Image (tube, rainbow, N blue to C red):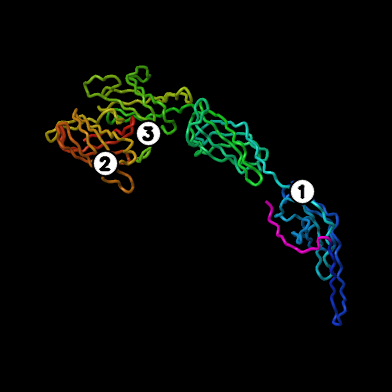
């Protein structure tokens, strides 16, 4: 954009210009200096590259000796004043606030007022500033997506398309992704991803998404809307929206990596789950031989991601029961003290994902009887004490998971230990200002009609502490453990 020209409204005899000679006088009143009128600028030319843009016009003329500067007068028929611009060269510009219409232009050479006086105005030249008819920007075409992704090397999907022929008039291209079904019907709701693509200087646009933009997309069916947005709405309307179906499929799942915990039964966890996608299935296989030919146990877990006031929980682990010494393992159970070999795979969905390779084989020994911490059973009970026998552990299930996850005032829990069950209602008593723990007071009735009270504290770091008054064969007992989200409920496995 050119700088604004300073405008002067000047009086001028629009039909003719006159010489006004000035004289210097002696003490006797006689003049001894003669002022000479400057010559009229000749060969005045008006040119333009766009007769709808006042800034595209240029005025040229021949130089006049002893003139400095020159004034350019622009006026319409019937005006009493002209709009004036000034230049010190033989090239000038029009006033930039002209409205569309027919105009006349005259150039005047300016003298120093002593030796030289102003010239007459040049012969009026006619020109027309035409009205700009607002046009619509062009339409993009050939929209394509390259879904190649390499997170480790920060390589993300690339969007390409043919833009408009006049990218200098484009502020940016607007891009929106909408989920669709296999027939291209849009899902209800807002775009799942949207961003702006710089117009650049070429009509061919190639744009690599950023990590944040890519993070809003998962493999599936989409329609992508693209249009050019005008940078000057006085001259252009936004381009037409072009909708193009695209599909992100043929995704090779990464190889899962496996961590095994044998402190209480066996817990197997995929520890690179954040690179995978919700809805897939992990299959954990346990073999008795290093060659992995003798399958002895298998578990499948549907990977899920759940957010709550405690943060984000990932379902990415499976538990295996290790039976007590001398017991015979049942289906998918393991023998105490035996050495096993485990692998895990992530299964594709035959639509967008391909199966992952099999993980590296992990060797482990089933050192402790019990069940892993994914909620399949309790920790082993402690030794008898205070007249009460050792228990089978206690599993506490919060049955109002949705309300609880939103910070509900009450929750309902069920405690099952050694075949003795009770149901307690918890009332929210304390929420620390930092939101790190939630404390509930418990009350309920046992199987024999006895009144039971207690407290439950659930901490953001996945730990739980629960003190329950006497019920069944137990005196007042404090259980400690950890919680996880599984199957739509928070399951807490605890031991004394």
| Residue sitting at the far top | 294
Q: Quadrant of the C terminus?
A: top left
Task: Report the front residue among 488 and 326.
Answer: 488
Q: Position of residue 203 (x, y in %)?
A: 65, 37
Of pointers 3 and 1, the one earlier in the residue sequence? 1
Q: What residue did someone put label 3 on?
A: 314
Query: Which stretch is magenta?
Result: 1-15
Q: Is residue 218 above or below residue 86?
A: above
User: How would you rate the neighbour count of disc 1 (Cα within 10 Å): few for under 14, some for 14-19, many for 20 or more?
Assistant: some
Reply yes or no: does residue 6 show up in magenta. Answer: yes
Residue at mark 3 to residue at mark 1: CA–CA distance? 67 Å
Q: Position of residue 437 (x, y in %)?
A: 30, 43
Q: What residue did someone put label 2 on?
A: 457
What secondary structure is found at the residue carrying circle 2?
Answer: strand
Which residue is depicted at the point 74% across and 46% down?
A: 50
What secondary structure is found at the residue carrying circle 1?
Answer: strand
Quarter holding residue 305: top left
Which residue is depicted at the point 69% across and 44% down?
A: 133
Of pointers 2 and 1, the one earlier in the residue sequence? 1
Do the CB atoms of the residues marked 2 and 1 lie less than 8 Å apart? Answer: no
Which residue is depicted at the point 30% across and 35% down?
A: 400
Q: Which mark is residue 48?
A: 1
Of pointers 2 and 3, the one earlier in the residue sequence? 3
């Amino acid at each position: 954009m050119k700088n604004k020209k300073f405008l002067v409204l000047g009086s001028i005899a629009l039909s003719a210009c006159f010489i006004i000679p000035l004289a210097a006088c002696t003490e006797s009143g006689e003049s001894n200096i003669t002022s000479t009128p400057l010559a009229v600028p000749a060969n005045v030319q008006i040119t333009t590259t766009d007769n709808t843009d006042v800034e595209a016009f240029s005025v040229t003329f021949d130089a006049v000796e002893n003139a400095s500067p020159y004034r350019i007068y622009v006026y319409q028929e019937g005006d009493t004043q002209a709009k004036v611009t000034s230049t010190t060269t033989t090239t000038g510009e029009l006033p930039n606030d002209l409205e569309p219409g027919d105009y006349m232009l005259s150039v005047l050479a300016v003298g120093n007022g002593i030796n030289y006086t102003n010239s007459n105005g040049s012969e009026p030249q006619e020109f027309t500033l035409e009205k700009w008819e607002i046009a619509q920007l062009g339409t993009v075409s050939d929209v394509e997506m390259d879904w190649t992704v390499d997170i480790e090397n920060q390589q993300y999907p690339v969007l390409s398309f043919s833009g408009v022929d006049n990218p200098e008039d484009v502020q940016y291209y607007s891009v929106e992704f909408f989920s669709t079904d296999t027939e291209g019907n849009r899902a209800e709701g807002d775009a799942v991803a949207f961003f702006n693509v710089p117009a650049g200087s070429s009509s061919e646009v190639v744009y690599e998404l950023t990590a944040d933009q890519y993070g809003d997309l998962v493999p599936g069916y989409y329609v992508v809307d693209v249009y050019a947005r005008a940078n000057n709405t006085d001259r252009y309307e936004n381009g037409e929206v072009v909708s193009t179906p695209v599909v992100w499929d043929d995704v090779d799942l990464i190889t899962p990596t496996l961590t095994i915990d044998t402190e209480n039964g066996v817990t197997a966890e995929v520890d690179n789950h954040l690179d995978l996608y919700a809805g897939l299935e992990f299959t954990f296989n346990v073999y008795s031989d290093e060659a992995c030919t003798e399958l002895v146990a298998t578990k499948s877990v549907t990977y899920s991601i759940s957010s709550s006031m405690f943060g984000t929980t990932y379902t990415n682990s499976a538990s295996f029961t290790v039976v007590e010494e001398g017991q015979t393992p049942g289906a998918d159970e393991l023998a105490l003290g035996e050495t096993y070999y485990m692998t895990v795979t992530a299964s594709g969905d035959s639509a967008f994902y391909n199966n992952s390779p099999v993980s590296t084989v992990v060797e482990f020994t089933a050192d402790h009887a019990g069940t892993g911490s994914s909620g399949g059973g309790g920790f082993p009970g402690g030794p008898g004490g205070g007249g009460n026998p050792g228990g089978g552990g206690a599993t506490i299930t919060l049955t109002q998971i949705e309300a609880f996850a939103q910070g509900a005032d009450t929750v309902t829990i069920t405690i099952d230990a050694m075949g003795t069950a009770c149901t307690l209602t918890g009332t929210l008593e304390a929420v620390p200002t930092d939101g790190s723990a939630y404390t509930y007071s418990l009350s309920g009735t046992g199987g024999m009609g006895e009144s039971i009270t207690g407290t439950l504290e659930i901490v953001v770091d996945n730990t739980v502490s629960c003190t329950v008054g006497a019920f069944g064969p137990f005196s007042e007992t404090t259980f400690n453990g950890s919680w996880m989200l599984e199957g739509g409920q928070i399951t807490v496995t605890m031991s004394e």
